Amino acid sequence: MDCQASLRLPGDPALAAMAAALRDGGHWAEIVDRDWRLVYSTEDLRRIYGGLVDLAPVALGVHYFGSEAMSVRLQWRNGPNTLDLVREMFAAFGGLVLADTAGGRDQLRTLVPPELRDIVDRISSPYPAPALTLRWHGTHLSVPVDVLTTTVRVHDTAGRCAGTALISKPRAGMAILATAAVGIDLRHLERMQHVVKAARRPAAILFADLEASSPLARRLPTASYFMFGRRLARAADQCVIDAGGLVGRHVGDGVIAFFLAETAGSESAAARACVAAARALRSTIAEVATRSDLAAEDVVPRFGLHWGSTLYVGQIATCGRTEVTALGDEVNETARIEACATGGRALASKALVERLGPDDAADLGLDPGRITYVPLAHLASATEKARRDAPAIAVCEV
């Protein structure tokens, strides 16, 4: 068993070359030698089996379907991590494994644990194919997943079989996977991996929305307003991602974003990123309005910025979408701040501004030591909900 951050390449040159190629290509892949002993597993596959939280341990140097390998699999968060799933996987691979077992069925029975031996007797015949695709099932984030594994024989320079590469993927075809992934910023996908497991995470919160968008929607042709909304959503997400944030829900013309201290490096850096994103978004909204042949007064944004010390942040994945969300009083308070930021203002709470260290504040052109604040309830633009839910939250323009 090996739980180190990364595995060394196999000692056999042919298997090492295949392992390096699959690693560099970001594949879900494992490599077994000619006796079906596991010699390599890519980090991308181990991360999936570790629930996107840890690199799952693997049983190196032992039979792929042996007792030790099965014991390790049953510890994984994802993948073939139950006895039923391991049995299904062995049934799918059995003919290929049998073809590589010198002693035939009798030897294979001794190599696998008792829970798998009845399957050995049911393998119809060995199939020593140079390449084939096998289907089995696993789990990912507690959801059943269809998996396709393509097996490719690896030969040394003398033409002898050195082992087999097991290259896996979700059952979905590459056209579907490419459609889901194309245009997605990889930086954002990587940040989302940090919140697969929901937990309390200090973060800066950004709410942005358009003021009086309903009259604009009624005035414009539906197709034109849809195009404007799509441009705005894309531009808003890019501003958040470029600043180092996580995009949350889109509500109408609005966007919610989170800037985690753990990914930004510090609370100060997260607060700075939130302010920077709001400023970038203000400029971008003006550019989107121009591209959509709208006047500046037609597209007036509101920004609310706040700090959440005890936010519970995580990822919600369903069969239809995946999004980052957060729970906590500060989320509702940010909405109240944003609703008060009429006239294109960006209002930030005292709790957020005072997270800024001297260098980050200077980069933003702010001096927290000289800023004065106003409670939401004292603003002329204060809404009824703000006066009711968050009257004492002190804010300033940023």
Image (cartoon, rainbow, N blue to C red):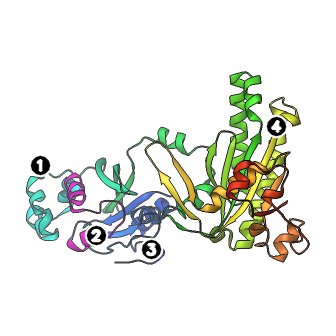
Label at residue 7: 3
Label 4 belongs to which residue? 299
Estimate the spatial distance between the alpha carbons at disc 4 and disc 3, rounded to whole Å: 53 Å
Q: Residue at x 22, y 54 (%)?
A: 88
Q: Residue at x 27, y 74 (%)?
A: 62
First in sequence, mark 4 or 1: give its number: 1
Estimate the spatial distance between the alpha carbons at disc 1 and disc 2, rounded to whole Å: 23 Å
First in sequence, mark 4 or 3: give its number: 3
> What range of the chain is rendered magenta?
67-92
Three-letter amino acid code of the residue under disc 4: Val
Label at residue 124: 1
Location of residue 202 in the rendering, given as x and y in whole percent from the top left corner: 63, 69
Estimate the spatial distance between the alpha carbons at disc 3 and disc 1, rounded to whole Å: 35 Å
First in sequence, mark 2 or 4: give its number: 2
Which element carries disc 2, helix, strand or loop? loop
* SS majority, magenta: helix
Q: Is residue 122 magenta?
A: no
Q: Residue at x 73, y 21 (%)?
A: 221
Which element carries disc 3, helix, strand or loop? loop
Foreground of the two, 272 or 340: 340
Location of residue 56 in the rendering, given as x and y in whole percent from the top left corner: 40, 70
Location of residue 165 in the rendering, given as x and y in whole percent from the top left corner: 36, 59
Estimate the spatial distance between the alpha carbons at disc 4 and disc 1, rounded to whole Å: 69 Å
First in sequence, mark 1 or 2: give its number: 2
Foreground of the two, 334 or 134: 334
Label at residue 110: none
Estimate the spatial distance between the alpha carbons at disc 2 and disc 4, rounded to whole Å: 63 Å
Label 2 belongs to which residue? 37
